[in-house]
């Protein structure tokens, strides 16, 4: 059955693949062990060569770096660690010269506690800035005003002795939540968006897009199950129904407002709509009206195990709810890398995780919506096991547990063989590089059978096959089949999720194998295809 996508207007991002640059770990231009704009600018030609269309750069603003930049102390500057505003301008200009678009990470849910707004808010309970944040009296009888918990563990409230009130923070206590019901704050962010649009950015990835508005009565969230001491912060967070702190109706009004700011500049609004229940109907609300976010990241595909029914329901439900406006990522700086996640053995001792991740990328690239790679996905990188004494993630450090943090997927890009992987000239990268020679860009770049070459070929096809930019999706197989398969115009995609080879009957017509994660592309005589395990393929209908 087809999905109704009545004459969608194609925009520039419809034909592109995005690429997440975690700037701290991409390329270090000044030899201090941390990635920066000079380093990124030097590597943009690599991204153009790879075939990327959109570069998303993670936060680079002045910051005390408690959450590595997601704690912003100035929304209109560049932290000296990453360079200067001039370095930023050079990077944007060079990206554009190479035909790349650059979007930046906007962090509107919270600022740093070092932001002048919070400093003023804290210093003067009667001042105009107090209302930029959420301050509340203790509960009757004492203690935090309600039972809300932080994503990073513990209560979402911290007591401020001097004013005898609590302030809200859904992440670290050094990341106080901004109050989006304050009209002046709304105006501040209009100016932030305009500032960066004036510097020629092509859009924004919006951090915690589901969280800006809170229920201002701040009732307790219903608790679904008890929290036990062995739980990770993530597990504890989902012990609650986040009915009053996340996904409030007013969020979309903010994006409608921003849409009117970016639209005259043809800018993209891409939200991180991270709902722990991964309910696609809720996510679709952010994009459904066509005047809010252009695209919303859907997170279930980054958490799904390699299990046919789980993968089927992830994509079927998502595409039923939002047939064309979601964004798909293979991995991210917040989650285990796909080859690790898909590897049956931990740590991986074979390359089945990589094979699955590449086959999975074929699926994501063929779906309606905007697909993203995370830096290093194209090399098939697995997570690095970071020794306890080298952990940097704030939650992992606090709990002395790598599993509670995200360092394993944030280690620097391996450009060349060597101890620091060509990432930095420093002997002390901020996280260890720890890669084999075979994992590096240098080793894979000229090898036509490498994962890098296979990803590059896939990116080129995604751009070339115009049916993948806008054509309606029609499922070929049903959810009881071990092959996920669908057609879009004259293209079809199939992903074998079975542990064995599986035959798939092709729709009528003559088909050519345009891409396979496993074998050479080429002409086909048969009316069915025997898919390897795992294997992802793209087929194109022959015109004559
Ligand atoms: C999501 C970001 O991707 C993550 O890295 C960050 O810690 C939280 N939002 C808080 O900003």
Image (cartoon, rainbow, N blue to C red):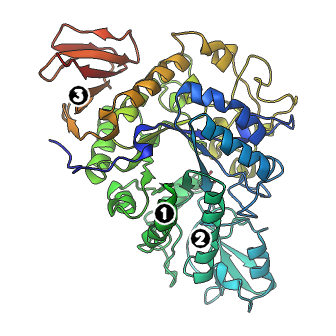
Where does label 2 land, which residue? 190
* Residue carrying label 3: 490
Q: Is residue 462 visible?
A: yes
Q: Are marks 3 and 1 in contact (CB under 8 Å)?
A: no
Coordinates of residue 219 in the picture (x, y in percent): 49, 81
The residue carrying mark 2 has its beta carbon less than 8 Å from ligand 1 = no
Q: Is mark 1 within 8 Å of ligand 1?
A: no
Please give left or right for residue 517 compared with residue 4 in the image. right
- Which quadrant would residue 111 be assigned to in this image? bottom right
> What crowding class fits label 3: few (fewer than 14 Cα within 10 Å), some (14-19), or many (20 or more)?
some
- Residue drawn at (24%, 49%), measured in percent from left and top? 5
Q: Determine the secondary structure under disc 2.
A: helix
Q: Indicate the position of residue 523 as horizontal and vertical percent values.
A: 27, 8
Position in image of residue 337 (x %, y %): 55, 34
Question: Label 1 neighbourhood size at 10 Å, few (<14), some (14-19), many (20+)?
Answer: many
User: Circle 1 sits on which residue?
Assistant: 210
Q: Quadrant of the C terminus?
A: top left
Dot in front, 2 or 1? 2
Residue 36 appears anywhere in the view: no
Name the quadrant where ligand 1 sits: bottom right
Front-most of residues 388 and 431: 431
Return the mark for residue 283.
Answer: none
Instruction: Mark 2 or mark 3: name the one nearer the start of the chain.
Output: 2
35 or 432: nearer the viewer? 35
Query: Which numbered disc, 3 or 1, marks the residue that appears first in the sequence?
Result: 1
Image spot of residue 149 (x, y percent)? 58, 67
Q: Residue at x 55, y 74 (%)?
A: 147
CA–CA distance between discs 2 and 3?
43 Å
Report the residue at 38% width, 44% height from top.
Answer: 369
Please report contact status of discs 2 and 1: CB closer than 8 Å, yes or no.
Answer: no
Secondary structure state at the residue bearing disc 3: loop
Give the alpha-carbon distance from disc 3 to disc 1, as whole Å: 36 Å
């Amino acid at each position: 059955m087809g999905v109704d996508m009545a004459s969608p207007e194609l925009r520039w991002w419809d034909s592109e693949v995005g690429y997440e640059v975690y700037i701290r770990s991409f390329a270090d231009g000044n030899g201090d062990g941390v990635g920066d704009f000079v380093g990124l600018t030097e590597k943009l030609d690599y991204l153009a060569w790879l075939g990327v269309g959109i570069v998303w750069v993670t936060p680079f603003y002045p910051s005390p770096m408690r959450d590595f930049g997601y704690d912003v102390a100035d929304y209109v500057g560049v932290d000296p660690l990453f360079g200067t505003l001039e370095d930023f301008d050079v990077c944007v200009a060079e990206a554009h010269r190479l035909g790349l678009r650059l979007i930046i990470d906007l962090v509107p849910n919270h600022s740093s506690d070092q932001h002048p707004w919070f400093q003023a808010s804290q210093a003067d309970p009667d001042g105009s800035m107090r209302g930029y944040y959420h301050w509340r009296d203790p509960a009757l009888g004492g203690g935090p005003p309600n039972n809300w918990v932080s994503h990073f563990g513990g209560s979402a409230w911290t007591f401020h002795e001097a004013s005898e009130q609590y302030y809200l923070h859904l992440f670290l206590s050094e990341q106080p939540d901004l109050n989006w019901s304050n009209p002046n704050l709304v105006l501040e962010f209009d100016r932030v968006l305009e500032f960066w649009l004036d510097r020629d950015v092509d859009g924004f990835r919006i951090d915690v897009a589901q969280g800006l508005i809170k229920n201002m009565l701040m009732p307790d969230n219903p608790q679904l199950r008890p929290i036990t001491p062995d739980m990770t912060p993530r597990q504890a967070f989902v012990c609650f129904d986040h009915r009053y702190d996340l996904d409030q109706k007013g969020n979309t009004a903010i994006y409608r407002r921003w849409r009117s700011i970016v639209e005259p500049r043809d800018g993209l609004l891409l939200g991180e709509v991270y709902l722990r229940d991964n309910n696609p109907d809720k996510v679709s609300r952010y994009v459904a009206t066509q005047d809010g976010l252009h695209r919303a990241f859907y997170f279930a595909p980054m958490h799904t195990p390699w299990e046919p029914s789980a993968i089927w329901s992830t994509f079927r439900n998502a595409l039923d709810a939002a047939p064309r406006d979601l964004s798909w990522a293979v991995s991210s700086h917040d989650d285990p890398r796909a080859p690790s996640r898909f590897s049956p053995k931990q740590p991986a001792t074979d390359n089945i995780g990589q094979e699955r991740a590449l086959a999975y990328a074929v699926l994501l690239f063929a779906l309606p919506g905007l697909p993203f790679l995370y830096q290093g996905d194209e090399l098939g990188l697995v997570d690095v096991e970071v020794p306890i004494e080298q952990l940097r993630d704030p939650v992992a450090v606090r709990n002395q547990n790598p599993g509670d943090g995200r360092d394993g997927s944030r280690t620097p890009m391996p450009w060349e063989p060597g101890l620091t992987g060509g990432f930095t000239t420093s002997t002390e990268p901020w996280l260890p590089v720890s890669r084999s020679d075979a994992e590096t860009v240098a080793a894979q770049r000229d090898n036509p059978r490498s994962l890098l070459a296979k990803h590059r070929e896939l990116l080129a096809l995604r751009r070339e096959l115009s049916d993948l930019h806008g054509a309606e999706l029609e499922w070929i197989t049903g959810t009881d089949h071990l092959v996920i398969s669908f057609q879009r115009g004259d293209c079809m995609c199939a992903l074998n999720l079975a542990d064995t080879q599986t035959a798939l009957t092709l729709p009528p017509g003559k088909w050519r194998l345009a891409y396979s994660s496993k074998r050479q592309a080429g002409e086909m005589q048969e009316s069915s295809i025997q898919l390897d395990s795992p294997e992802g393929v793209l087929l194109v209908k022959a015109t004559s």
